Image: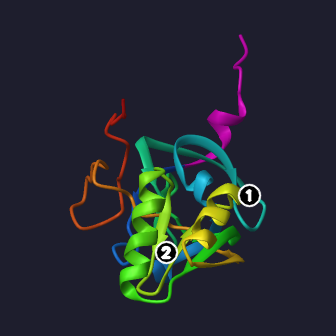
Amino acid sequence: MFAIHTPWTTMRRAVHMAAAGRWPEADATGTLTLVFDDRHRRRVRLTTDDGADLLLDLPRAVALADGDGLLLDDGEWLRVAAAPEPLLEVVAVSPQHLARLAWHIGNRHLQAEPFEDRIRIRPDHVVAEMLRGLGAEVRDVTQPFQPEGGAYDQKSDPGSHAGSQQAGHTHA
């Protein structure tokens, strides 16, 4: 008899996530740097910043954020880092103008990361021109992206981004 080994069975596994500030960050033995789309997963093969392969193997998909921790099956912790990625930064002339711009962004169902004085969105030349037409300054930036989860996200940990997943909300 012989045993069949696949990479999934011999690879270290990340089996639990903890939100930033809720895990022993000083115990992190490595970092996993990912863009936003790669931080919303349940099960996928990943490579740490130092080149080690691991299997993200969580009970359900979560939206990982910068500073979150992943507990490996060997008891070690990895820190999640948000990788910089190309974005558009939308700047308004006043708080009321920013609210108006946010409404137009939301009306197009775009993922957005709001700040007190600006909004970051993914690059889209059509939306950028629309926003400029509404009087916004729109500039290209390269920054980590952590868009707002939205009212229909379910949270396993109220008050935290950790454990968010889509609730099956659709629009007609």
- Closer to the chain start, of discs 2 and 1, is 1
State whether residue 144 is above or below residue 150: below
Residue at (63%, 72%) from the top-left corner?
A: 132
Residue at (35%, 52%) from the top-left corner?
A: 164
Q: In this view, does 100 lie to the left or right of 54?
A: left
Q: Would you say residue 34 is visible in this rendering?
A: no
Range of the magenta residues? 1-13
State whether residue 62 is above or below residue 92: above
Q: Mark 2 points at which residue?
A: 67
Residue at the extreme right: 51
Where residue 42 sits in the image (x, y, percent)? 49, 42
**Quarter containing the N terminus:** top right
Q: Name the residue under label 1.
A: 52
| Label 2 vs label 1, nearer the camera | 2
Q: In this view, does 55 lie to the left or right of 41?
A: right
Where residue 104 sits in the image (x, y, percent)? 45, 61
Residue at (52%, 56%) from the top-left corner?
A: 74
